[in-house]
Amino acid sequence: MRSLLRPLQSRVLASPRTASQSAHRRLQSSLAACPSCHTPFRTHIPACTSCWSIHPLPPNMTHHDLLDVPYEPNPFHVDPRRLKAQFRKAQAQCHPDSWASKSPKQLDLAHTLSSRINEAYQCLLDPLARAEYILKRNGVVMSETDQTDDMELLEKVMDANEAIAMMGPEDADQISELRSKNQDDMKRVSDVLEGLIREQRWQEAKGEAIRLRYLQGIERSYRKWQEEQT
């Protein structure tokens, strides 16, 4: 269990390389104003509460654009408070409850938009899902079968599983300490991942995202253990 008590070694970033492509430009919604009454939309959501018209999203609308979250200079960097505020603002514009008395077509569109907003919010809120989304947009796809060759991390996973299997209610404080240390490791890996994405080092970023996936698995196991003791 010694591997659980020592922090994972942070990966040291090499010198940044010149990006081979120009910086990603944020998409500007073509629906800047309601096509029915020409009132400016309050968000990128094409739902107008002035004339109660609602429209489909453009097919290439990204999660970042949908919630008005900056993509540049680093799409991985997200302010959780701003994200939550933008999420609430967007949902208020198209929540199905607000469109319940409208036509079936309008209500269906409201449900579709609301679901899409929820999807974008959950993706950008979670560091791993956010990293996978950004990597996919840049041609690097993660799969469920991707594994790490980091022996230190694999040892940590095995030790965590062993600790959870052996410990009882009297070991709650020790589990809390181990969980806290694992959360520190998650933060360190997320910081490295943020730097790699900023520098557009996509394959290296994928490697760190895989490491984060393992650490999130440990976090879920610790959380489940604690919930079962209450």
Image (spheres, rainbow, N blue to C red):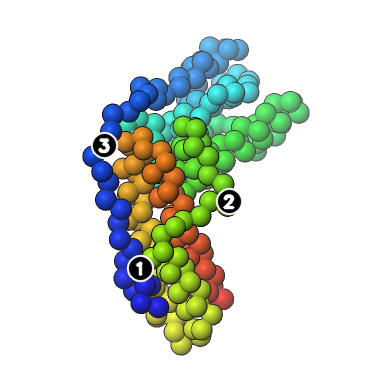
Residue drawn at point x = 49 percent, y = 43 percent:
132
Q: Can you identify the residue that label 2 sits on? A: 144
Q: Residues within 10 Å of mark 3 (few under 14, many from 20)?
A: few
74 lies above or below 152: above
Q: Nearer the viewer, residue 145 or 65?
A: 145
Give the CA distance from mark 3 to mark 1. 29 Å
Residue drawn at point x = 35 percent, y = 22 percent:
22
8 horizontally vs 168: left or right: left
Q: In which quarter of the image is the N terminus?
A: bottom left
Q: Residues within 10 Å of mark 1 (few under 14, many from 20)?
A: some
Q: Which amino acid does label 3 sit on?
A: Pro
Question: Could one spot residue 127 in this view of the protein?
Answer: no
Q: Quadrant of the C terminus?
A: bottom right
Image coordinates for residue 81, horizontal then vertical, percent: 38, 45
The image's mark for residue 16 is 3
**Residue lying farthest right?**
104
Determine contact: label 3, label 1, CB under 8 Å.
Answer: no
Residue drawn at point x = 71 percent, y = 31 percent:
108
Give the CA distance from mark 2 to mark 1. 25 Å
**Residue lying farthest bottom?**
170
Q: Which of marks 2 and 3 is nearer the N terminus?
A: 3
The image's mark for residue 181 is 1
| Secondary structure type for disc 1 | helix
Q: Which of marks 2 and 1 is nearer the N terminus?
A: 2
Question: Could one spot residue 100 in this view of the protein?
Answer: yes
Q: Which amino acid does label 1 sit on?
A: Lys
**Total marks drawn?**
3
113 lies above or below 217: above
Q: Which amino acid does label 2 sit on?
A: Glu
